[in-house]
């Protein structure tokens, strides 16, 4: 093993991500550690940056499957834009646009109901 590799606890400390979540990323094939003979996970020197990319993708609404698809296109400077990465990102944007439209529709329906409610002061009735 090289000195640049870190154990899961050190990776957690450097990234602020729990070891449990790092193991989940491994389970989702987003992060691949090397295994020592004793079973300890060791991560490559670029693992903190990789975890940062995973976190940003999750925060932007991409699913684990989409992140797994786009990770081969990720480099130190960000995402290399190719047909594949563009398709994954465009699909994510389209899904978010549909969710926003759906929420706006639901909000309009609820606002309509609020407009129909009497604006009289609240008077509690018998229980």
Image (tube, grey):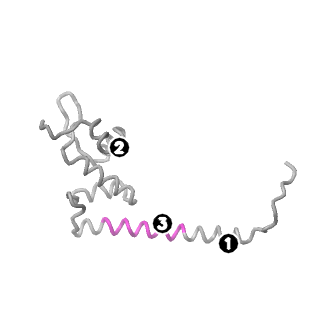
Q: Answer with mark 3 or mark 2, whichever residue precedes in sequence.
A: 2
Residue 17 numbered mark, or none: 2
- The mark total stands at 3
Q: Look at the numbered discs 1 and 3 and tell me whether their residues touch, using CB distance below 8 Å.
A: no
Mark 1 or 2: the one toward you: 2
Q: Nearer the viewer, residue 81 or 3?
A: 3
Q: Earlier in the sequence, mark 1 or mark 3?
A: 3
Q: Which mark is residue 112?
A: 1
Marks 1 and 3 sit apart, C-alpha to C-alpha, by 20 Å
Q: Seen in the image, is 99 located left or right of residue 3? A: right
Which residue sits at x=74%, y=71%? 116
* Residue position for label 3: 99
Q: Is residue 125 above or below residue 24?
A: below
Q: Residue 125 placed where, x, y %?
A: 86, 54
Q: Residue at x 31, y 65 (%)?
A: 88
Q: Is residue 101 magenta?
A: yes
Q: Nearer the viewer, residue 8 or 68?
A: 8
- Say whether residue 91 is magenta: yes
Magenta highlight range: 88-103
Predominant SS of the magenta segment: helix
């Amino acid at each position: 093993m090289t000195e640049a590799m870190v154990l899961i606890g050190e990776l957690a400390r450097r990234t602020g991500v729990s070891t449990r979540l790092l193991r989940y990323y491994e389970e989702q094939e987003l992060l691949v550690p090397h295994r020592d003979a004793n079973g300890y996970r060791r991560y490559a020197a670029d693992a903190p940056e990789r975890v940062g990319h995973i976190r940003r993708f999750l925060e932007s609404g991409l699913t684990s499957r989409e992140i797994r698809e786009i990770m081969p296109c990720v480099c130190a400077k960000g995402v290399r834009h190719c047909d594949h990465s563009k398709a994954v990102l465009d699909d994510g944007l389209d899904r978010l646009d549909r969710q926003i439209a759906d929420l706006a529709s639901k909000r309009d329906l609820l606002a309509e109901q609020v407009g129909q409610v009497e604006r009289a002061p609240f008077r509690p009735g018998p229980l």
